[in-house]
Image (cartoon, grey):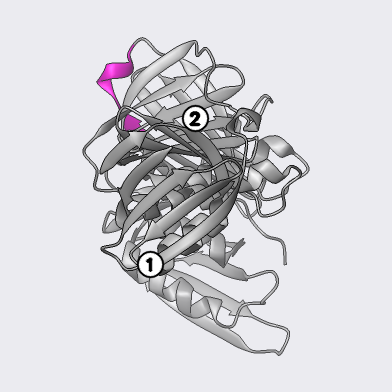
């Protein structure tokens, strides 16, 4: 291998790959990034055996192709501290990689490329084209409701449910549920489910761009999902488990009130200040033409907030985790939102006043 590459072009994929590589490695080679030349590009690959990320960098020149692996962290640290306009020359020796830039020269230890594990080359039964920005939006609106180290391992991720020209994302942790969907005419032939692990969801969110109008390819089989975008290929193992029927979690409430989104959000933010630091509970008291929000803590401090609304039904009081309410409200974009109550023991359904297809369920707390 004997190539030259621009420092800025190399830095971004190296930073992304550093997020995939686990800090504690069972094998030394898993701390390395695989460098390989192909079609006048440098391909960089990192993996933790559960996920694999491949990035590409255009080469300025190549006099000799090649493949090797070097420490991802050290290569990233070197690129990070070099000048922004630096040109890097990489040449492969017997057991090392020589990196030159201006008056700087680094010699990095290598491990054989043949020993590097590969997750990408698999046969996929399902393939579809989706919008990069659309998938990023779905994950952003649901990821916070994933379980974290739950013994029910199927909750530690997001369900990707594709059917009837819709891509739906569902996350729940036993205390709340988040649902988001987008319509996609190009997938009328696809009906499938895939359960993405938590770490894969978070890494994929970092890779996807909100403002990208580009399309990308999703390929799925029973074990893996592969996302191919313009600048990266991301492969992840799936959680092999049956996801609970999330439709049964959605409450069929009969009491609906419409609230100004900013008003209820700011009232909850203020009430959260004096809520119990551990349990984060607030009480919602639905009364004639108002919603009373109250909270207290172990120091006997308390707060009350009143939000005006149009309501003339029966009074109702129910407690919720204020952080869960704020997570849901913050993802909705409409000026008005709906709170759909069941009863004092039932869940709260939160959705937009418009036809936005996203909704959230928060289960009650008992004080």
User: Residue 160: which numbered mark, if any?
Assistant: 2
How far across and down, in percent of the image, does residue 210 sit?
Answer: 29, 48
Residue 251 in sight here? no
- Answer yes or no: is residue 179 visible: yes
What distance separates the C-alpha of mark 2 from that of mark 1? 41 Å
Q: Which mark is residue 117?
A: none
| Dot 1: element | loop
- Residue at x-position 21% and y-position 38%: 213
Residue span colored magenta: 182-188
Image point (33%, 33%), residue name: 182
Q: In the rendering, at what x and y percent does residue 184 appear?
A: 29, 25
Q: Earlier in the sequence, mark 2 or mark 1?
A: 1
* Residue bearing the label numbered 1: 82
Tell me the quarter of the image containing the N terminus: top left
Which image quarter holds the C terminus? bottom right
For the point 48% across and 52% down, the residue is 98
Residue in the picture at 45% in, 32% down: 66
Q: Is residue 187 magenta?
A: yes
Relative vertical location of residue 340 with respect to residue 308 in this rendering, above or below = above
Mark 1 surroundings within 10 Å by alpha-carbon count, few (fewer than 14), some (14 through 19), many (20 or more): some
Q: Residues within 10 Å of mark 2 (few under 14, many from 20)?
A: some
Residue 239, picture quadrant: top right
Residue 295 within the magenta-colored segment of the rendering: no
Q: Nearer the viewer, residue 62 or 173?
A: 62
The quarter of the picture where residue 3 lies is top left
Residue ranking furthest to the front: 94
Where disc 2 sits, the SS reads strand
Residue 238 vs residue 17, the one in the foreground: 17
Measuring from the top left, give residue 83's x and y in whole percent.
32, 68
């Amino acid at each position: 291998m004997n190539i030259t590459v621009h420092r800025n072009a190399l830095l971004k994929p190296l930073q992304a790959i550093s997020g995939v590589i686990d800090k504690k490695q069972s094998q030394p080679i898993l701390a390395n990034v695989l460098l390989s030349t192909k079609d006048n590009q440098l391909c960089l690959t990192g993996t933790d055996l559960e996920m694999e990320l491949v990035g590409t960098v255009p080469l300025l020149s190549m006099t000799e192709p090649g493949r090797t692996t070097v420490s991802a962290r050290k290569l990233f640290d070197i690129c990070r501290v070099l000048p922004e306009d630096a040109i890097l020359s990489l040449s492969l020796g017997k057991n090392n990689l020589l990196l030159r830039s201006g008056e700087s020269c680094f010699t990095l230890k290598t491990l054989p490329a043949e020993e590097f594990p590969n997750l990408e080359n698999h046969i996929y039964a399902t393939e579809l084209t989706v919008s990069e920005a659309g998938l990023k939006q779905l994950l952003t609106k649901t990821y916070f409701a994933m379980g974290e180290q739950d013994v029910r391992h199927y909750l530690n991720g997001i369900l990707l449910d594709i059917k009837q020209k819709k891509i739906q994302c569902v996350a729940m942790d036993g205390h709340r549920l988040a649902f988001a969907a987008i319509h996609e005419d190009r997938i009328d032939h696809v009906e499938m489910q895939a359960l993405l692990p938590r770490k894969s969801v978070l890494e994929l969110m970092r890779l996807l761009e909100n403002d990208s109008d580009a399309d990308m390819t999703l390929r799925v089989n029973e074990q893996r999902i592969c996302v191919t975008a313009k600048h990266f290929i991301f492969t992840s193992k799936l959680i092999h488990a049956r996801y609970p029927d999330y439709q049964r979690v959605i409450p069929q409430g009969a009491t609906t009130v419409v609230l100004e989104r900013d008003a209820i959000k700011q009232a909850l933010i203020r009430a959260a200040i004096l809520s119990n630091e551990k349990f984060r509970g607030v009480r919602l008291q639905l009364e004639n033409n108002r919603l009373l929000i109250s909270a207290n803590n172990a120091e006997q401090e308390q707060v009350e907030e009143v939000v005006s609304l149009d309501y003339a039904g029966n009074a109702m009081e129910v407690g919720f985790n204020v952080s869960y309410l704020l997570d849901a409200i913050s993802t909705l974009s409409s000026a008005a939102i709906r709170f759909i109550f069941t009863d004092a023991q039932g869940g709260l359904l939160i959705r937009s006043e418009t036809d936005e297809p996203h909704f959230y369920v928060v289960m009650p707390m008992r004080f």
